[in-house]
Image (cartoon, rainbow, N blue to C red):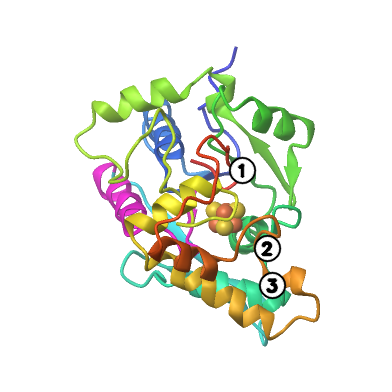
Amino acid sequence: MMNPFLINEPTCISFSGGRTSAYMLWKVLQENNGLPDQAIVCFANTGKEEEATLEFVRDCSSNWNVKIHWLEYQWDEDTKKRWRLVDFETASRNGEPFAAAIKSRRYLPNPVTRFCTSLLKIRPFAQYLKTLGDDWQQMVGIRADEHRRVVKIRNRPDEEGFSRIMPLADAGVTKEMVGEFWRNQSFDLGLPNMNGVTMHGNCDLCYLKGGHQIVSLIQEKPSRAIWWAEMEEMVSLLVDKPSGAVFRSDRPSYASMIEFNKDQMNMFDPDENGISCFCGD
Ligand code: SF4
């Protein structure tokens, strides 16, 4: 079998800011003796990532001497441009790109219409790459043990004009292997690794995370919930249908969760699993 990490056509390495996609980047650098000219590395900041994630993206770049393009969603009415380039210093930290995406849609993303991954990550990548030329493939950090995601992408490899490749899945890389790799590095993501899952990863209170997980993240740091509650309130003033103003119709609002947290109440089944999203690890 061909080495899945070898790059010989224009390739965007999609870096989510998690351990898995960072490991994928490291493998690419090892197997190609550095970053090939035909490859670029992109990270999309939603503004709702933990600070530790932003530090980790910066640290991968400096420790491995590789340029990472930081992108954020924006909507420029005049130029119709949906992205802007930022860096560690200038990256949004209070959900500004995410709030702009919600304003443009006038309803909240939810488990059925998960427009945030596409609007905040996939489309900014696609539009940005177009400015650099055509026919990019996208390398995504999906591991071999993420069976459902692997099958979904194999069945539908094209998205937003990209063909997606999954070298980690092709090479049989599992979460245990990724964990082992990071235990032996001189730096790491400053977020806990719980059996290969980074509960704090991606957007801090992503509505696809399990309810119990969200409550424990609010208990750990109540201010995390404020932005989510503000979004619910903002959209409730914009929409006619109340269903458009909640991230989950099967759960209490984030504002209620703030209140429940004050009363220390248990609302969710501790064994509930989150829904897998494509924002990646
Ligand atoms: S992490 Fe969750 S909330 Fe954030 S962009 Fe991905 S799906 Fe949306």
Q: Residue at x 37, y 36 (%)?
A: 34
| Visible residue check, residue 47 | no
**Which quarter of the picture shows residue 92?**
bottom left
On the image, numbered disc 2 is attached to which residue?
109
Tag 1: residue type?
A: Gln
Cα distance, mark 3 to mark 1?
33 Å
33 inside magenta stretch: no
Residue 243: % across, % down: 76, 68
68 sits left or right of 72 in the view = left
Q: Residue at x 45, y 33 (%)?
A: 24
Q: Position of residue 209 (x, y in %)?
A: 55, 47
Q: Nearer the viewer, residue 166 or 222?
A: 222
Near-viewer residue (134 or 139): 139
Label 2: how many Cα within 10 Å (few below 14, some 14–19, many 20+): many
- In the image: residue 60, left or right of residue 231: left
Where residue 179 sits in the image (x, y, percent)?
35, 27
Judge the density around disc 3: few (<14), some (14-19), many (≥20) Cα neighbours within 10 Å. many
Find the magenta span and give its range: 40-64
- Expressed as whole percent of the image width and height from the top left, the position of residue 191 reads 32, 45
Q: Is residue 56 covered in magenta?
A: yes
